Image (cartoon, rainbow, N blue to C red):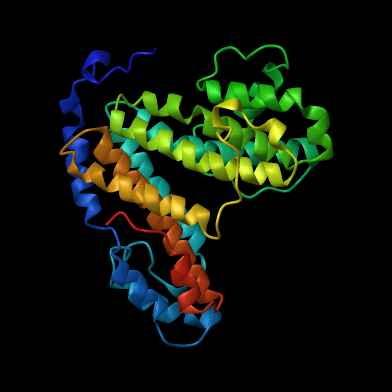
Amino acid sequence: MKTFLTLSERGIDPHSWCFLSGRICVLENNFLRRDSFERLLLLEGPVGAQHAVPLLTSLKESPLRDDFLTPEDVLNFEEILQRRFFRLLQEVKELSPTLAVWELLQTRYDLINLKNFLKERLFGLSRPAPFPSPYTDETWEARWNTVSSKEYAVGSSYPLYQTALKNLKEHLEEVSKNPGLIDLILDGAYLSSLPQLAERTASQFIMNYHLEYQKLMGILFSWRAGTKGLSGYIPKQIVSRGGVTPPLHGYEKTIEDTLMERLEAARLFVFGPERVFGYLKGLETETLNLRLAIGGRLQGIPSEDINRRLRKGYV
């Protein structure tokens, strides 16, 4: 059995997290409470783009006041929220004694960039602007060219990308007929690699969180693949045990709310990677909820419908 190494056993002083943990304590005060979202959803006024002004007034009364300065910022909320999230993620990276926690969050967005890069390269599909990342198109091109169906690339920072690209090349003929397999294969590689990524943090709490995430999301992942007759592409690490039953309506939201409840205990750690990880996951969820709330109001979606889609917050 593989031995789990703590921070001290890895030669990392646990107290090296103290400064960043203190900064996180301050940043946690900026999280929006549920009542802040309720105020956003209950705003009265014109629907659509004309609703930007009352939304701006509400946002100026929140910790996001420095990010939303004009009605145009509200209309460009996707860009504003993304910039805010990655600015804070970058701050955590710069202040962290190790990059393991940052990598856990960043890898998901790097993988989305890789998927979009491959869809454009292989099928000429247009793609959105990539998320901020240390990896460029040149990085992905080099990795794609050095991974064969028989051997791994040398010098890759993440075995995850080696595995994902290797699996993709092994099924390139099927992929050429069904571009959706790019998402399935790369998402499967990501989900199966999560415990190894989490183990680098040297935190049993973070490790347990991702083992539960892998189990719960594995059920949904297996079911979705099964409904499309694509179960053969699922990594064995995440194949649902005991058969797969169709999830109930709202299953994915239920998963995320359940995991957020588990994550609340991260705030009990005075300092350490757990406190930092909990904050970043909370920030990620808050960003999603803000996109749902602002975007929904601008589109004229009824408040009660938006409210049902909001995820459980970290605070």
Q: Quick check: 248 left or right of 62?
A: right
Q: Quadrant of the N terminus?
A: top left
Q: Quick check: 45 left or right of 93?
A: right
Give the x, y percent position of residue 133.
Answer: 50, 37
Q: Quick check: 32 left or right of 164?
A: left
Please tell me which residue lies in front, 211 or 198. Answer: 211
Q: Quadrant of the C terminus?
A: bottom left
Give the x, y percent position of residue 81.
Answer: 44, 57
Give the x, y percent position of residue 209.
Answer: 36, 37
Residue at point 29%, 33% (across, down) = 205
Please tell me which residue lies in front, 253 or 243. Answer: 243
Q: Quadrant of residue 151?
A: top right
Q: Quadrant of residue 62?
A: bottom left
Q: Is residue 306 above or below residue 99?
A: below
Query: Residue lying farthest bottom?
Result: 45
* Residue 286 visible in this rendered orientation of the protein: yes
Residue at point 19%, 47% (across, down) = 25
Q: Quick check: 95 left or right of 239?
A: left
Give the x, y percent position of residue 56.
Answer: 39, 75
Q: How many dots with numbers?
A: 0
Q: Is residue 78 above or below residue 207?
A: below
* Residue 84 visible in this rendered orientation of the protein: no
Residue at point 81%, 32% (across, down) = 174
Please tell me which residue lies in front, 315 or 239. Answer: 239
Please tell me which residue lies in front, 261 or 84. Answer: 261
Residue at point 50%, 87% (across, down) = 46
